């Protein structure tokens, strides 16, 4: 038995104003801890600007080679921070997946410096 719903779209969103968002430099604090074969990361991220920080992805990578570590479990990803807003994100991966390297967190985003 299948259910289907069709919701007609009356118009499309106009997202052109996103192109005009000023660049934002985020304040980021990172800490790592190893325990029982896992490496735990805590990232504190703050938007100190007066502008929206839009669609911020976080990525855990090996320190050398810039290779993403997978699998990783984290609280959230692709977040948006309002002016003055801050969040603390936690995640972890298997320490063996780091190949004896230190982890690095990369932060990007639509209008992030």
Image (cartoon, grey):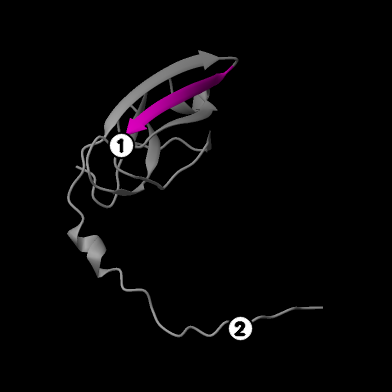
Instruction: Classify 103 as above or below 69.
Output: above
Residue 64, located in which quarter of the rendered image?
Answer: top left
Q: Position of residue 34 (x, y in %)?
A: 50, 15
Instruction: Name the quadrant of the N terminus.
Output: bottom right
Q: Residue at x 34, y 44 (%)?
A: 82
Instruction: Name the quadrant of the C terminus.
Output: top left
Instruction: Classify 55 as above or below 67.
Output: below
Q: CA distance from mark 2 to mark 1?
A: 40 Å
Instruction: Classify 63 as above or below 17.
Output: above
* Main SS category, magenta section: strand
Looking at the image, do the residues carrying marks 2 and 1 touch, with CB atoms under 8 Å apart?
no
Q: Which mark is residue 84?
A: 1
Instruction: Classify 86 as above or below 33.
Output: below
Residue 82 is at least partly visible in this image: yes
Residue 44 forms part of the magenta stretch: yes
Residue 43 forms part of the magenta stretch: yes
Q: Residue at x 41, y 47 (%)?
A: 78
Residue sitting nearer the eye, 36 or 85 = 85
Residue topped by disc 2? 6
Q: Nearer the viewer, mark 2 or mark 1?
A: 1
Q: Position of residue 35 (x, y in %)?
A: 56, 14
Is 84 situated left or right of 43 in this image?
Answer: left
Mark 2 nearby-residue class (10 Å; few <14, some 14–19, many ≥20)? few
Is 74 situated left or right of 12 in this image?
Answer: right
Give, as a single range, the part of the protein colored magenta.
37-46
């Amino acid at each position: 038995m299948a259910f289907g719903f069709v919701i007609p779209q009356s118009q499309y969103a106009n997202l052109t104003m996103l192109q005009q968002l000023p660049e934002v430099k985020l304040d980021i604090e990172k800490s790592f801890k190893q325990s029982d074969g896992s490496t735990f990361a805590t990232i504190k991220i703050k938007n100190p600007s007066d502008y929206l920080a839009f669609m911020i992805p976080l990525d855990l990578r090996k320190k050398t080679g810039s290779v993403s570590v997978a699998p990783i479990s984290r609280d959230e990803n692709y977040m948006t921070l309002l002016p003055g807003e801050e969040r603390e994100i936690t995640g972890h991966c298997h320490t063996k997946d780091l190949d004896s390297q230190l982890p690095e967190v990369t932060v990007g985003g639509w209008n992030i410096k």
